[in-house]
Image: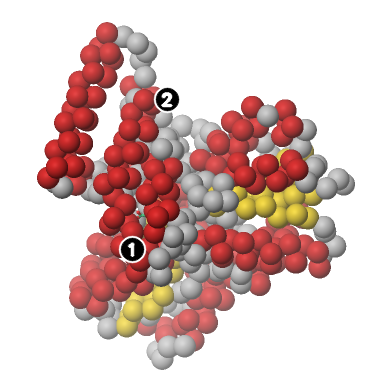
């Protein structure tokens, strides 16, 4: 076997407050994150939302120390994975490729080419697949590959998702059990699985398997944990005006309190590292909400980070992938759609007169909306919840 590399994919996060605005711009420029009827609207809208949202977002990053810990933790995972692979007799170079911040996926590919990697395992650090996360990175890679003959010489394989891996499930249930064992009468504690949400139309129209993978994952963790605790699954971090997967975390917590639940333990399951949504949203916002709603004891299970059982499983995944038939981007970047078209494609009927007229009208509405919002600080984007 030639020189082996592992490319770890992740979202990326602003390392300092000045990074928040360009990070948000990159995020909202991604058509897998906001689906718009017209491609040309993507960058102006990304500029608009990032400009109007960043001060609020900066406040959240300020509350967790001024930046996202995601790069540091992902690099620690990379080091731990490399060590574990070496112990298992596999020499591999590990690369981190983030989607929206440094080190960008493009930067990782420059290093992979420079190091003359011949076998590459592409491993997203998202246990469950979503069009908006792993899918977005796979599509980016698919495009970069198609543009670069040097990349086409590399034998690569993709691991699409791995939420059902025994090691991952073991590591998650060990973390939960450890947290439960710190508490008295732990069998009464309600386990509250909180997954990052996605818009409903991703699942129902675009065919995103995310919801079913999250539901299966929750059940598998409960089976592995094998304790009598009651549990609930809900979705957090909704952004924007459209409907997202339900129940929403911020509604489910007060409902449970009303039903008489007094002890709640939140288990974050869509992300393997601590990040803004665990450290700020869960530990601060949802804790506050829970206490206001009458929950007496609020606990949170830590993220996996470099949990040894988890890292061991990542190493096994890499070794197994090297021995298995290759999985190509074309197989994983485009989940089969539920309806004939992606939501944004329904509008793409070509350069018809009607489309041109609507382009013009929407542009005017957009410009007026921006001006009103910039001047008054209030407007349609605040109303629909994007800001
Ligand atoms: C599996 C995890 C994630 C899914 C699914 C996901 C979908 C998704 N996210 C947004 C919008 C935002 N995400 C933001 C930050 C962010 N998102 C995830 C994970 C998932 N996102 C993480 C881990 C982070 C934080 C990184 C860090 O800095 O620690 C943000 C920015 C933060 C903020 O301003 O609140 C936005 C905005 C959408 C629209 C979406 C699905 C379509
Ligand atoms: Fe997100
Ligand atoms: Fe949030």
The verdict on label 1 being within 8 Å of ligand 1 is yes
Front residue (pair 37, 15): 15
> Could you say where residue 327 lies in the image, as x and y percent from the top left?
69, 39
Q: Residue 344: which disc?
A: none
Residue sitting at the far right = 1
> Could you say where residue 135 lies in the image, as x and y percent from the top left?
52, 41
The answer to which of marks 1 and 2 sits earlier in the sequence is 1
Residue sitting at the far front = 18
- Residue 161's place in the image compared with 230, above or below, is above
Local SS, label 2: loop
In the picture of the structure, the residue carrying the numbered disc 1 is: 60
Q: Residue at x 50, y 69 (%)?
A: 303
Q: Residue 340: which disc?
A: 2
Front residue (pair 4, 194): 4
Q: Mark 2: few, some, or many residues within 10 Å (few <14, many ≥20)?
A: few
Q: Residue at x 58, y 61 (%)?
A: 74
Compared across the picture, whether 183 is left or right of 200 comes to right
> Could you say where residue 339 lies in the image, as x and y percent from the top left?
40, 29
Task: Give the CA separation, mark 1 to mark 2.
Answer: 39 Å
Its colouring scheme is: secondary structure
Residue 155 occupies quadrant: top right
Closer to viewer: mark 1 or mark 2? 1
């Amino acid at each position: 076997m030639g020189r082996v590399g592992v490319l770890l994919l992740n979202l990326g996060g602003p390392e300092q407050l000045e990074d928040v605005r360009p990070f948000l711009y990159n995020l909202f420029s991604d058509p897998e994150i906001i689906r718009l009827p017209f491609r040309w609207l993507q960058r102006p809208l990304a500029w608009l939302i990032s400009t109007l949202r960043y001060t609020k977002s900066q406040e959240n990053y300020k509350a967790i120390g001024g930046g996202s810990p995601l790069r540091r933790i992902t690099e620690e995972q990379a080091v731990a994975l490399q060590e574990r692979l070496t112990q298992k007799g596999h020499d591999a170079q590990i690369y981190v490729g983030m989607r929206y911040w440094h080190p960008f996926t493009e930067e990782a590919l420059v290093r992979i080419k420079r190091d003359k990697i011949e076998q590459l395992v592409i491993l997203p650090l998202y246990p469950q697949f979503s069009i908006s996360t792993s899918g977005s990175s796979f599509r980016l890679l698919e495009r970069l590959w198609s543009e670069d003959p040097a990349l086409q010489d590399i034998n690569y394989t993709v691991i699409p998702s791995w939420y059902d891996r025994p090691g991952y499930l073991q590591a998650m249930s060990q973390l939960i059990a450890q947290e439960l064992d710190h508490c008295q009468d732990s069998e009464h504690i309600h386990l509250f699985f909180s997954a990052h949400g996605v818009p409903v139309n991703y699942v129902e129209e675009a065919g995103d398997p995310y919801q079913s993978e999250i539901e299966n994952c929750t059940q598998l963790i409960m089976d592995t944990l094998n304790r009598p605790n009651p549990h609930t699954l809900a979705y957090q971090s909704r952004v924007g005006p459209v409907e997202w997967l339900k129940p929403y975390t911020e509604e489910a917590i007060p409902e449970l309190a009303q039903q008489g639940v007094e002890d709640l333990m939140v288990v974050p399951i869509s992300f393997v590292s601590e990040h803004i949504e665990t450290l700020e949203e869960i530990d601060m916002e949802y804790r506050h909400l829970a206490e206001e709603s009458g929950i007496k004891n609020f606990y949170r299970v830590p993220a996996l980070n470099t949990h040894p059982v988890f890292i061991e499983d990542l190493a096994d995944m890499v070794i197994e992938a090297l021995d298995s038939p290759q999985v190509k981007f074309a197989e994983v970047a485009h989940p089969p759609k539920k309806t004939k078209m992606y939501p944004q494609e329904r509008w793409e009927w070509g350069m018809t007169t009607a489309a041109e007229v609507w382009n013009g009208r929407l542009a005017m509405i957009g410009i007026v909306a921006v001006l009103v919002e910039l001047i008054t600080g209030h407007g349609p984007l605040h109303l629909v919840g994007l800001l």
